[in-house]
Image (spheres, helix red, strand yellow):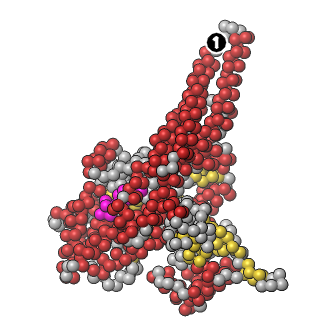
Amino acid sequence: MNQNIPELYGSLVFNDKVMRNKLPKDVYKALKKTMQNGTHLELDIANSVATAMKEWAVEHGATHFTHWFQPMTGITAEKHDSFLSPVGDGEVIMNFSGKELVKGEPDASSFPSGGLRATFEARGYTAWDPSSPAFLKDKTLYIPTAFCSYTGEALDKKTPLLRSMEALNHQATKLLHLMGHEEVHGVTTTIGSEQEYFLIDKALYRARKDLVFCGRTLFGAAAPKGQEMEDHYFGVLKPRVSAYMHDLDEELWKLGVPAKTKHNEVAPSQHELAPVFETANVAVDHNQLTMEMMKKVADRHNLACLIHEKPFEGINGSGKHNNWSISTDTGVNLLDPGKQPAENTEFLLFLAAVIKAVDDYADMMRVSVASAGNDHRLGANEAPPAIVSVFLGDDLTKVLDAVESGASFKEPEAIQMEIGAHVIPHFMKDNTDRNRTSPFAFTGNKFEFRMPGSSLSVAGPNVVLNTAVAESLEQFCERLAIVPAEERKEAALSLVRESIKAHKRIIFNGNGYTDEWVEEAKRRGLYNLKSLPDALPRFVAEKNIELFTKHHIFTKEEIFSRYDILLENYSKAIHVEAKTMLEMMEKDFLPSLFSYTKELAAAACNKKSLLPSLSTAAEEGILTKLTDLSDRIYLMTDTLKANTAKAESLTDVLESAKYYHEHILQKMDELRKYVDEAEALIPDSYLPYPTYDKILFSV
Ligand code: ADP
Ligand code: MG
């Protein structure tokens, strides 16, 4: 099929082209102004936009509209209303007003609200976010919205993100003005989030309760082959996977999601999709859509897409690299070092601000990626450790060393790559190598935050990053504002020098996977917050509350509500896992194990009654091992059941999360060991669920 991709791209989006066609000129201008500068939109303009949106949507077959929002569940929510409006005599027209576009009133009481539940009424509001384009899906017009309580507290992920983008914009613009860049009227945060996922056969997925209920396997003996051959990463795409990826790309392109790169990842059945970066708010919305479409398209191909951080034990889990930068409205990427970084004062200022921010708020960076799923991944061999540090690379480190010591920095000469085969065209070598082990790495003209898990909304990490950097910039502004304009360049350089000296401990260019680094980090006084219950108390630490309230990102109540929700979600996730494990044991696994041992015992008896001299050593050997294991499994199942009941009685959210961490997860691990050992001794035909070798190598 020959497709015109530029025509297909964004065909389901109420984008600039459609707006220019559909809207009266003055309305278009007013809307653009709102989108670009965040200015308030008058109701008559909203009415006009609503009419155009409806016309366009109906032309494309839509019958409904929905406010689309991102509650604290981490996924999206929607409630559909038809455009239908009765006009008497049993007739209807298709109607959509500015009021309906701007504001919705979903019942907020059934969404997670943490402590806010006690203080607000059930009523909640969704409010149109004109900075993220509306789109069509399933014959419905989707309108991106923020979601707040009756009393105005944010109940979602979008609101704080927008607030943090505003805070960063404000401080960055102020700093640029102080440095003489009056031409800049605003800066935006840009994000490109690389999404990892697993693709497995749908029938096999359905056959595993743990995958269906928990998104990850709770048992499973390792397959004879894992990822040790290093043959999956960037390997040839199998036809089924390739067909899926093409279909997915097209669906995303229609929705205006700029899907760009796709490849096989390290683990068998693991893949990645990376988009071209966009404004943070749109990128976050698009990442949510990407995850949704990944699952939907998989279903069409008889596949299941797993976005959990650790679906399988013993092979890599999945993450979501958050590439982050800031650009001016004049088109300058503020983290682009340019040809002479040592002379680029603005770049150095912004770089120093980021380093300072990550050091001052390393604990919050860790909190922002905390989840039950991600705990299995951080600190394992596929993901950065739970310790936050910054990788700069040799070149940039040399620049900063020179700035710090006041020495002059000599730009390294570009080196031509020589690989010995002369037919290969010449190219220049990059100055800095890559480092895949760092949680927060400078990668040329942006930072890549590698700690977020694959299922996480990246709104959270970017709220922290934006706000922490806004705080650094504000402190820089205060220092520079009292210096006469002509001395500011010099003052900025000494500020950079001072800041680097003060925050050097967060910079680490070595291998983040080693034990030595864990020791070294401890000596440097860096946080190593291994689990969610370890990390969460930092969210409500005085300095962090001060940061978020000062920049109007969260009120104190919003912080405590989020703290509650995160802890509750953690406990709930593990609770569901424990219950799934118990059910799989009692209803499925133990009965299978008993059938097989019964069969073995009968076989041994038959042999003996036929001919007493026949050896039954093999049957007896396996029978003994399996009996021993089934006793252990039974006992551990009982302990897990008792602990789960105890956990249910705990009311303090932190105490409960700690209990789940220390007494439930740990017992689940022990139980799993016995089960996996038994699984390896039981023939597939007896097992109640498909094994790793089938699941991981069937597509
Ligand atoms: P790699 O895969 O080696 O990490 P890529 O060049 O593929 O590097 O980039 C990864 C992601 O970074 C992509 O989503 C890309 O769009 C994004 N990216 C590039 N420049 C920026 C930027 N200025 N701000 C935010 N993200 C960016
Ligand atoms: Mg990357």
At x 69%, y 28%, the residue is: 595
Q: Nearer the viewer, residue 681 or 444?
A: 681
At x 61%, y 87%, the residue is: 48
- Horizontally, is 418 left or right of 343 in the view? right
- Horizontally, is 102 left or right of 439 in the view? right
Whether the residue under disc 1 has CB within 8 Å of ligand 2? no
In the picture as drawn, the residue positioned furthest to the right comes out as 89
- Horizontally, is 635 left or right of 591 in the view? left
Q: Position of residue 91 (x, y in %)?
A: 81, 82
Span highlighted in magenta in the image: 356-367
At x 50%, y 41%, the residue is: 665
The quadrant of the rendering that contains the N terminus is bottom right
The mark total stands at 1
Tag 1 secondary structure:
loop
Q: Position of residue 183 (x, y in %)?
A: 34, 84
Q: Is residue 358 a member of the stretch shown in magenta?
A: yes
Q: Classify 502 as above or below 217.
A: below
Q: Classify 181 as above or below 554.
A: below
Can the viewer see residue 404? yes
Q: Position of residue 383 (x, y in %)?
A: 43, 50
Q: Callout 1: 10 Å neighbours few (<14), some, many (20+)? A: few
- Horizontally, is 647 left or right of 525 in the view? right
Q: Please identify the dominant SS of the magenta region.
A: helix
Q: Position of residue 416 (x, y in %)?
A: 31, 61
Q: Nearer the viewer, residue 215 or 474?
A: 474
Q: Is residue 163 a member of the stretch shown in magenta?
A: no
Can the viewer see residue 316? no
Tell me which corner region of the image, top left, top right, bottom left or bottom right, holds residue 684.
top right
At x 63%, y 39%, the residue is: 584
**Residue type, mark 1 in image:** Ser
Q: Classify 434 as above or below 62.
A: above
Q: In the rendered image, which residue does mark 1 sit on?
A: 615
